Amino acid sequence: MQDDYGKLRQFNHVHSDGRQLFTACIELMLIYESRVALSDSSEGLRHAYDVMVEPIRDRVNYYSIEESVRRKKIKQSAFELAPYSLEHSHSDGTLDGITQITLLRGENEDDQSDLFFDWYDSDDGYIRLGLPIEEVMANPEDYLALCLDAAAELPFQLGMAGFSMNYEDIYINGNEHLADPIIGRFPGVNVVHAGFYRGISDGLPTVNWLTLVRSELVERLGGLAKLKSQEGDGVVVHPLRHGVAVQAGPRPLLGDVNAQESLAPYYRVGEMLAPVRTRSELESGIRGSRAEATEWGHRFFGSAP
């Protein structure tokens, strides 16, 4: 299993100056509509922040509150910036304080490492947590509990957790080819940044180890009882306040094509959720065009190879 992680990490991209720019990790991402998440209170978002930051609080060493400025050495006050903003939110979805923050562990301030927290609030916001692969795979039950807790109170639009690549959404522009060998060999790995999933409101763009389905889509699928009746063969449906999280197997999988690693639970979940897949195109150039990126996102909605 350790060797499997090395097989994925060979596709990490390190700049000639040593900066980590494209890094394998296991990621939880939650996408939300700001107007909805902040309309009554920001408690769901604040709870997600607390749950996601706690496991990395003592390990991050850099932070930034804007993509365009250099990151700074971490200080205790950095952890209070997002809570202050959320405590001063307005019903129209606006905030008085910061609207984004990144916390990470890196060799230098420009790294995109495998241990990070990233929050960005706009009309459609996202909140992300990245953890080292070995850490999650050593205790997948604990990681599952963390993911479910983070999503417990948030009125999410969509979300997922599993193998992923961490990079800045602006960095990938012109560098989409970095994802090509991963797409071809490891279909269990998400290669699309959370920023490109924002704004998708008509359905689900993809499936991962955990796939979050909001309440509206659960009803379109026939309701919680119908989804629960489809459990089995590694698939588990976890009820949440604002929807469900559908789990594909006991732990995340790479789906290494060279090793013929089966992703049967992912395809089972895709079959269950296919009726609510999005008809919108992914705003990403992965694989060369939005249409091809969208097709890649839908890979588990069809029959298993």
Image (cartoon, rainbow, N blue to C red):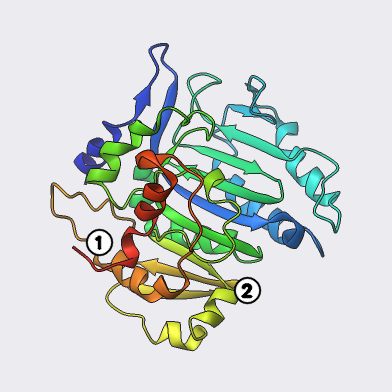
- Residue type at the position of mark 1: Leu
Q: Is residue 276 left or right of residue 200?
A: left
Query: 10 Å neighbourhood of mark 1: few (<14), some, or many (≥20)?
Result: many
Q: Name the residue rendered at 46%, 31% in the picture.
A: 172
Q: Position of residue 110 (x, y in %)?
A: 53, 21
**Outermost residue, left direction?**
259
- Sequence-wise, the earlier of marks 1 and 2 is 2
**Mark 2 neighbour class, 10 Å CA radius: few under 14, some 14 to 19, many 20 or more:** few
In the rendered view of the protein, which quadrant contains the C terminus? bottom left
Q: Where is residue 133 in the image (x, y as percent from the top left)?
A: 36, 43
User: x%, y% of residue 303?
Assistant: 25, 69
The secondary element bearing badge 2 is classed as loop
Which structural element holds mark 1? Answer: loop
The residue nearer to you, when weighing 143 against 207, is 207
Q: Please identify the quarter of the rendering in which residue 297 is found.
A: bottom left
For badge 2, the amino acid type reads Arg
Question: Is 133 in front, or is 179?
Answer: 179
Q: Can residue 139 be seen in this view?
A: no
- Give the CA separation, mark 1 to mark 2: 28 Å
The vertical placement of 103 against 122, above or below, is above
Left or right side of 266 for 64: right
- The residue carrying mark 1 is 263
Q: Where is residue 190 in the image (x, y as percent from the top left)?
A: 39, 48
Q: Which residue is drawn at 82% across and 46% down?
A: 95
Q: Is residue 4 above or below residue 162?
A: above
Residues at circles 1 and 2 in contact by the CB criterion of under 8 Å: no
Where 288 sits versus 88, above or below? above
Write down the residue under mark 2: 241
**Residue at image point 58% right, 27% down:** 61
Q: Nearer the viewer, residue 86 or 69?
A: 69
